[in-house]
Amino acid sequence: MLHTRTTPAERRRDLREKLASGRLLRVPGAISPLSARLIQDTGFDAVYLSGAVLSADLGLPDIGLTTATEIAGRAQQITRVTDLPVLVDADTGFGEPMNTARTVQLMEDAGLAGLHLEDQVNPKRCGHLDGKSVVPREEMVRRVRAAADARRDPDFLLMARTDARAVEGLPAAIDRAKAYVDAGADAVFPEALADEAEFEAFRKAVDVPLLANMTEFGKGRLLDVTTLENLGYNIALYPVTLLRLAMGALEEGLRVLAAEGTQESLLPRMQTRSRLYELLGYDEYAAFDSTVFDFTLPPGT
């Protein structure tokens, strides 16, 4: 009620322990604090905050227009309502290595369990679009080192994302990943791998936790959890799934409302009022409120 029952430090340790377990973690991307609560209620392992989702929610394309403080602000709203660890997309670090260092501390202060930084140039673009460019490997190494040096909680997860597969090829992406790990990254996010063979090659070459990005309409096909487990991956990420589901439902609902002049036929598709109240914990608030106001002061007070 009002906030989580766990501390950021506890949630960071929770994420570390889950990654060390060897099982695949299923991590959907939240589109709001309420959706993060639903992710927890449905039994997933962690919550993700996508830069692309936040940009879209603000009516902006995912080309580096959002700021570190906007991301941190939304992140804080989400970490307030879920006891799951939350991983955030920190884009390129929002500037030079010193900016990256500040970004890490902003995200720590927002209660996050970790972040990932990428090696694209700024302004960046969606990792599954053509025309990407990556910075020289040495520049990204400086970003990762700055992030590692700025980290105050050693349990805060620092993940490096490489977009080099589409630009320089798979061997170069693997070489970059190894350099980023040497610079202080705890985990790696290889973006836009083409097929299962590439996922397997990356796993064999890089000995830290790996994230598989299962975004829809991307470069590769969507792999199920059994396949990803067999490939040895640690996180299955569904970054934009909830946004796409929600926007599809919104579009269809608005068309029906415009055509029919009433939302009557849409009622079976809606979350009920009682389910919403259950998710929000209305009963707990009511119980708390009664303990505050239903009392009698002792004599003399």
Image (cartoon, grey):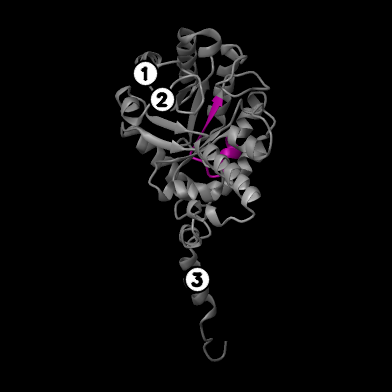
Query: Which residue type carries mark 2?
Result: Leu
In the rendering, which numbered label is found on residue 286?
3
The residue segment tinted magenta is: 104-117
Res 145 seen here: no
Label 2 to label 3: alpha-carbon separation = 43 Å
Query: Callout 1: 10 Å neighbours few (<14), some, many (20+)?
Result: some
Q: Determine whether, in the image, residue 207 is placed left or right of residue 74.
A: left
Magenta residue check for 111: yes
Indicate whether 262 appears above or below 286.
Answer: above
Q: Reply above or below: 88 against 264.
A: above
Amino acid type for the residue under numbered disc 3: Ala
Q: Which residue is drawn at 56% across and 10% down?
A: 167
Residue sitting nearer the eye, 40 or 194 = 194
Location of residue 179 with respect to 85 vertically, above or below: above
First-in-chain label (1 vs 2): 1
Secondary structure of the residue carrying tag 2 is loop
**Can residue 69 be seen from the camera position used here?**
yes
Tell us which disc is closer to us: 2 or 3.
Answer: 3
Which residue is the site of mark 1? 203
Label 3–label 1 contact, CB within 8 A:
no
293 over 41 or under it: above or below: below
Residue 210's mark?
2
